[in-house]
């Protein structure tokens, strides 16, 4: 959990636990798991600035009071004097109250500092004047145990995961054996698909140990002048994170959730997925279409051949010699006499004459002029 906390604070994105399945295609039912939730909200501040001289050094200090009643001192940095530009400290909370037993809080803290500037990596511009009008940002944050339901799927080896619902209401412990009794999340909505008989709970001692560890993480400050001097690397990562505080707290909660989900698994057939194997579906009606078209064309050809055989007209066009033995009626023949040696003689003699082939009594054919 320590490594996950550091990773969530100092990195910008946390990946969900890897989904693995041999076929690369699988869907799971809505799966419920113990998790860590988090949130941050801007706090209103009251600021009072004053000037001091100590050891002949002039210093400008601003006292900042947040909504929860906590106070922080911010000061001006010069080339010769370190100034406090950012502070993080545990807090009783205003929006998320640490003494509220309806949630399993593991961290309540506030961040107070000068607004992060675009031309500064740590958020503070060396040598700037601070007074009552200098922008100060105060943010209240909290982390707590919760229950989340997930929708998971894998399509062609690409995993997808999304949170469908979150539940945070705890059963308040008010008996004499509260230290030994697990704190449980009861009455989960049916839409979260909790497994029948499943108990999502945490022990007080585990929560207490995590609370004390996180208090040391979220406690410190940054002093700056020509170079920054932070109390820890985690504190140094929190100041620029105030520019996108919601994404930062969600990333931290997701990193801690991964530890909860992977170190305390509870395999159960209730959450078994449905696997899909890549396959090909053959639609035979389309596969047989080319063969059907070929068969139909063959049948048409055979039908034409049979019809031709039954016809009284013989297939004389199939022989180039047939036209040599076609007779011409006498009137046409006389018009053709002497035209064989003339240029385009036949065309001039009979070019516009309509003729037709007629069958003679002895079976031959004769070309006759049609009226």
Image (tube, rainbow, N blue to C red):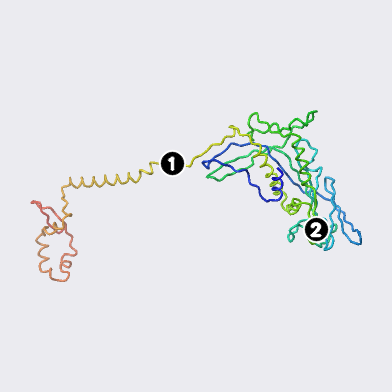
Q: Which mark is residue 257?
A: none
From where the camera sits, is residue 371 visible? no
Q: Position of residue 13 (x, y in %)?
A: 66, 49
Q: Earlier in the sequence, mark 2 or mark 1?
A: 2
Among the 4 quarters of the image, the one containing residue 343: bottom left
Among the 4 quarters of the image, the one containing residue 82: bottom right
Q: Position of residue 204 (x, y in %)?
A: 76, 34
Mark nearest the camera among 2 and 1 is: 2
Which residue is the extreme one toward the left? Answer: 362
Q: Position of residue 31 (x, y in %)?
A: 62, 36
Q: Tell me what residue is drawn at x 68 percent, y 31 percent.
A: 199
Q: Which mark is residue 224?
A: 2
Q: Tell me what residue is drawn at x 81 percent, y 49 percent.
A: 44
Q: Find disc 1 in the rendering and name its residue.
A: 281
What is the quadrant of the C terminus in the image? bottom left
Q: Secondary structure at mark 2?
A: strand
Please count the marks in the image.
Answer: 2
Seen in the picture, residue 174 relative to 367 is either above or below; the reply is above
Q: Alpha-carbon neighbours of circle 1 within 10 Å: few (<14), some, or many (≥20)?
A: few
Q: Alpha-carbon neighbours of circle 2 within 10 Å: few (<14), some, or many (≥20)?
A: many
Quote the CA–CA distance across marks 2 and 1: 68 Å
Q: Secondary structure at mark 1?
A: loop
CB of mark 2 within 8 Å of CB of mark 1?
no
What is the quadrant of the N terminus in the image? top right
Looking at the image, residue 310 sits to the left or right of residue 163; the answer is left
Looking at the image, residue 282 sits to the left or right of residue 227; the answer is left
From where the camera sits, is residue 29 visible? yes
Q: Tell me what residue is drawn at x 84 percent, y 51 percent.
A: 72
Q: Tell me what residue is drawn at x 64 percent, y 41 percent.
A: 163
Q: Position of residue 241 (x, y in %)?
A: 73, 52
């Amino acid at each position: 959990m320590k490594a996950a906390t550091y990773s969530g604070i100092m990195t910008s994105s946390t990946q969900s636990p890897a989904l693995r399945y041999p076929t690369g295609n699988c869907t799971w039912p809505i799966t419920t798991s113990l998790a860590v939730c988090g949130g941050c909200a801007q706090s209103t501040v009251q600021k009072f600035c004053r000037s001091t001289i100590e050891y002949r050094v002039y210093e400008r200090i601003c006292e900042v009071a947040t909504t929860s009643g906590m106070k922080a001192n911010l000061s001006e940095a010069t080339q010769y004097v370190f100034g406090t530009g950012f502070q993080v400290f545990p807090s009783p909370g205003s929006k998320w109250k640490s003494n509220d037993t309806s949630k399993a809080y593991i961290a309540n803290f506030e961040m107070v500092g000068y607004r992060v500037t675009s031309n500064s990596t740590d958020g503070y511009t060396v040598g700037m004047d601070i007074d009552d009008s200098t922008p100060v940002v105060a943010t209240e944050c909290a982390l707590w145990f919760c229950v989340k339901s997930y929708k998971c799927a894998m399509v062609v080896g690409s995993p997808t995961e999304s949170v469908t619902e979150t539940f945070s209401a705890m059963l308040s412990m008010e008996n004499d054996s509260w230290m030994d009794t697990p704190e449980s999340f009861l009455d989960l909505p049916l839409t979260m698909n909790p497994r029948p008989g499943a108990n999502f709970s945490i022990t007080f001692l585990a929560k207490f140990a995590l609370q004390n560890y996180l208090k040391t993480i979220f406690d410190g400050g940054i002093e700056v002048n020509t170079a920054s001097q932070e109390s820890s690397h985690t504190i140094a990562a929190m100041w620029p994170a105030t520019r996108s505080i919601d994404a930062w707290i969600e990333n931290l909660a997701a990193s801690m959730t991964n530890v909860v989900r992977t170190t305390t698994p509870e395999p159960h057939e209730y959450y078994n997925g449905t696997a899909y194997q890549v396959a090909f579906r053959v639609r035979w009606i389309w596969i047989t279409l080319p063969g059907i078209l070929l068969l139909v064309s063959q049948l048409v050809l055979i039908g034409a051949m049979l019809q031709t055989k039954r016809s009284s007209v013989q297939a004389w066009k199939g022989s180039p010699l047939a036209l040599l033995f076609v007779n011409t009626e006498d009137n046409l023949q006389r018009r053709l006499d002497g035209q064989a040696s003339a240029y385009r003689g036949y065309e001039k003699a009979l070019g516009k004459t309509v003729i037709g082939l007629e069958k003679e009594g002895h079976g031959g054919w004769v070309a006759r002029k049609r009226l």
